[in-house]
Amino acid sequence: MERAAERAEGFNGLKRAIASLTAAWYGDPAQHQREMGAIWRKGWVAFTRAEALAAPGARFSGAIAGMNVLALRDGAGALRAFHNVCRHRGAELCPEGAGRVESGRISCPYHDWTYAEDGRLLATGKARAVEGFDRAGHGLVPLGVAEWGGFVFVNAAGGGQGDFEAEHASAVAPLAPWRPGALAPVHAETIDIEGDWKLFWENFNECLHCPGVHPALSALVPIYGRGIMEREDDPAWRGHGPDAPSALTGRLREGAESWTEDGRAAGPRLPGLSDEDAARGQTYAVILPSFFMVGHLDHARAVRVLPLEPGRTRLEATWLAPPDAGIDGAALAAFARRVMAEDAAACEGNQRGLRAAPFEAGVLMQEEYEIAAFHEWVRARL
């Protein structure tokens, strides 16, 4: 198996064809569980919006990657996260969604075991003391927790804000000028894909499909219509100066400002963006395996990726803008909604084909260098 490190010199590309992941990995239940344990429960995954936990005493509960998670803001303002499971007999502590931790106590609705907001077991309801039981050893099981860009991330393997930043600082740095933590949701949509979570990231990481699958997007970002993602993907990119046509530089088409139906900005240019930031058209930050955010001149869009079961994935997209921008969120979302629907259909077709695939693995071409890197990332964690 060739490694993705075998890149072409002088431009973004693979030196030679590389075998893709094993076809059976896309939907096999045993493989899915292996990935949940080795990847999703050992890394930082996007859990909820930070405003759901803005005030002391706020809590939010939900499922992700087979985990039932409870996150809360304690009375001192610290963010905490736990497995949402009572240590008595495994009952769910808090129902899904937002709520409050009253008086700094979390009580199990089944047998009234009660925990402090730092996870310590305080009381066991009507159960009497019994030999061999150590209350100190039955606190809630913690998860790592951190914030970035207005989102809360959790990590079943533990860790805190410093650990998150050490791992992902370089990945999120390009979006620093957007100040995403200061942006507010103006629209949100959920789409379910009958396709494996890895297929989503593979589709995300190449544009060979763009000319056929995304005609409107390829018109807005002409370099996508060439089947590549950025100017360095072209072996001749050094010969194209900054004033070259957008099909060679990666900028939006002439006269376009943002990812909207007509290409015009839906609101004012975000404060803090440089002319270069604005001209770029789209700037990405990716936090594998569960999240990406893309910044545009007037807004940003965040997408949370949730594996539901083998061969099935949910995308939760949130469009973000300054709170006082007065943007029509539904109108803003129309263009990217179309792109997401086209990607979903492509992934679903890919999934259907893989279920009947007459081969053990596919093949990656020169332009699919980012997929090769993603596959290396997956293999390394397995």
Image (cartoon, rainbow, N blue to C red):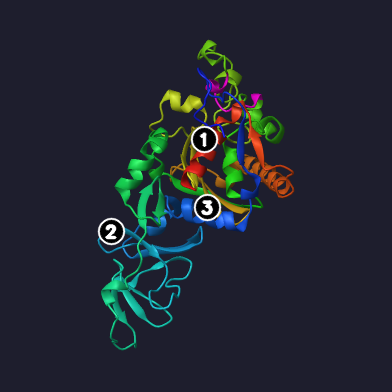
Please tell me which residue lies in front, 224 or 121. Answer: 121
Residue sitting at x 54%, y 57%: 33
The magenta stretch spans residue 229: yes
Q: Earlier in the sequence, mark 3 or mark 1?
A: 3
Disc 2 crowd rating (10 Å Cα; few below 14, some 14-19, many 20+) is some
* 283 relative position to 111: left or right: right
How far apart are the two marked residues, 2 and 1, measured between alpha carbons?
Answer: 39 Å
* 352 relative position to 206: left or right: right
Residue 349 pos. (x, y %): 72, 45
How far apart are the two marked residues, 3 and 1, measured between alpha carbons?
Answer: 17 Å
Q: Earlier in the sequence, mark 3 or mark 2?
A: 3
Q: Quick check: can you spot residue 113?
A: yes
Disc 3 marks which residue?
Answer: 35
Residue 39 versus residue 121 in the image, above or below: above
Q: Quick check: can you spot residue 326?
A: no
Residue 99 pos. (x, y %): 41, 67
Disc 3 crowd rating (10 Å Cα; few below 14, some 14-19, many 20+) is some
How far apart are the two marked residues, 3 and 2, measured between alpha carbons?
Answer: 34 Å
Amino acid type, residue under disc 3 in the picture: Glu
What segment carries the magenta color? 226-234
Disc 1 marks which residue?
Answer: 373
Disc 2 marks which residue?
Answer: 77
Element at badge 3? helix
Amino acid type, residue under disc 1 in the picture: Ala
Residue 10 versus residue 252 in the image, above or below: above
Q: Are marks 2 and 1 in contact (CB under 8 Å)?
A: no
Residue sitting at x 44%, y 47%: 184
Image quadrant where one finds the N terminus:
top right
Residue 317 pos. (x, y %): 54, 48
